[in-house]
Image (spheres, rainbow, N blue to C red):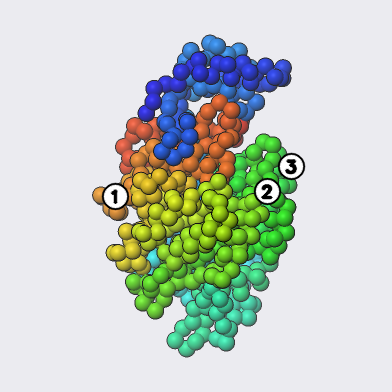
Amino acid sequence: MRPLSVIITFVGFLFAATSFSSTAETVTYYNMNGYSFTQGIGEEAQLTRFTTMVVTDGRIVATGDHGLRQLVEANREIDFHGKTVLPGIIDAHGHIQGLGQNLNEVDLRGINSKASSVAQVANYADQNLDLDWIIGRGWNQVLWPENAFPNRQDIDNVISDRPVWLTRIDGHAGWANSAALELAGITAETQSPDGGEIVKDENGNPTGILIDTAMELLTQHIPGASEQSIRSNYHAAFDQLLSLGITQVHDAGADARHLNIYQQLLSEGALPIRVHAMIAGNSPNLEALLEQGTSRDEFDRLQINSVKLYGDGALGSRGAALIHPYSDDPDNSGLLVTPEERVYQLFSTIHNAGFQVNYHAIGDYSNRLALDTFAQLEQEHEAPLAEMRHRIEHAQIVQVEDIPRFKTLGIIPSMQPTHATSDMNMAEDRVGTERIAGAYAWRTFLDQGSIIAAGSDFPVELANPFYGIHAAVTRQDRDNQPVEGWHPEQRMSVEEAIRSFTIDAAFAGHFDDDTGSLEPGKWADFIVINKDPFTIAPEHLWKIDVLATYVAGERQYKKQH
């Protein structure tokens, strides 16, 4: 770690920045234990410390030690009383509308039995008799004693008069009751669509479990959300994200309607965080959206310059596409959500339109398919891809020999640390001891010089970034199990973990010139926390509490005592 920043480095910039406007407001924040990365991204980034930060009209003009305060004629001064300050956290892969829905619907996360999950749904239904559909999310059969998919009768026993639809925690499977299946017209004769599966019992009848693209057979019959409810979901999500210290999110898949609502929120001044919105690759009007070109507003609140493509399913529901069959299901190799023959066409169309490709790939087959397609794209264009900062979202199960190709091709692995600690109770069962060597392989990626963009994949996982930082550093759950960490050879350092949630995540979203670190010229997006992550024991990282969150120098959240 470098010593405190030298004030003289920033004085000229300070006076230049404050002289252009007589109405500029300058705020000096002082008496802080400040940290930031400077001088680049990845291995080049240097962790520095400071005690004072000067902000004019939302942008940082200087950081330094206590002497800086005497050099500045500020409109306001704010004493942080020695509290630790970090750059605002950037979640490089989340689902904002999904989080809001999760906050406003049945939440089944973490429930450790099927019976308790059903009881939770029944209680919610009893308390919401006005709802035509009962919608929820978060169940995970891996946590249940039977470790098996549920079925429609489980819900029918308590709710048979209204349709019920419950999405699995990973969003790649759903659980319906008979009323919902009937409304959707799903019967024993209904065939599974490409890229999906209608799970059926020994008599050929649908069990109520729909995987990946099969979910659309049912979800298309759920009444569309009103604009009011979509806005309510966004605001609920924004409030939670700010309370967790998250100042920027890379929203992994927004269709035209949601992009339009984002634009409305922006024009109304109602977008309190920064959003790097990925266009949903399955949008029927994708080409029309691409023709509109990339966009970013002058205050860097909303950026649209990428497309989220859907490669395969998830590991928990055995929908992740594997090169060889699942170790615990030898007749199954997973599913490709986007047909293989369409992948190159989509990559090429998006790349040629000047947009970033963000391809969801969990299994080793989908990861290899993405890398092969990127290699073909580079060869045919005879130009490096690195400047586009294309990404593979999750990069979860990768053949060891394929990992160096990320670096060679300039592809960013966008990874979620808590996936490893959530999946560790079943991942090795799914892929076996050999393939696990290339799974959740953060250390291997870092050691070859790859930039990891970290996120949570909320609401699949909890959005708290310090849970992710803790998982990255310890490879343990929040009970600090297993004692030595799960495959501890893949740990990150504290510095690397925080970097992956700040400047490296900003780089992955083309935002690094304006956010991701507390440096002169960048927006003053920062958080005040109750513990110093660089000095506390790693097992306590998940307990860090956010006291305040600032975006462009304005406090958007303060913890109530």
SS state under label 2: loop
Q: Which residue is mark 1?
A: 489
Where residue 276 sits: x, y (%)?
Answer: 60, 47
> Which residue is at 69% across, 37% downward?
298
- Mark 3 Cα-neighbour bin, 10 Å: few <14, some 14–19, many ≥20: few
Which residue position is annotated with label 3?
267
Asked whether 312 or 533 is in front, the reply is: 312
Give the percent coordinates (x, y) of residue 234: 63, 49
Q: Residue at x 56, y 76 (%)?
A: 194
Q: Which of labels 3 and 2 is toward the front?
A: 2
Amino acid carrying mark 1 in the image: Glu
Mark 3 or 1, nearer chain start:
3
Where does the image place residue 244, in percent across and percent down from the top left?
Answer: 50, 41
Residue drawn 49% across the image and 78% down it: 199
Task: List the single residue furthest toward the front.
Answer: 382
Q: Is residue 120 above or below residue 81?
A: below
Going by the numbered disc 2, the residue's amino acid type is Thr
Judged left or right of residue 264, residue 304 is left
Q: Is residue 73 above or below residue 93?
A: above
Q: Mark 2 sits on what residue?
A: 294
In which image quadrant can residue 435 be found?
bottom left
Q: Is residue 437 above or below residue 264?
A: below
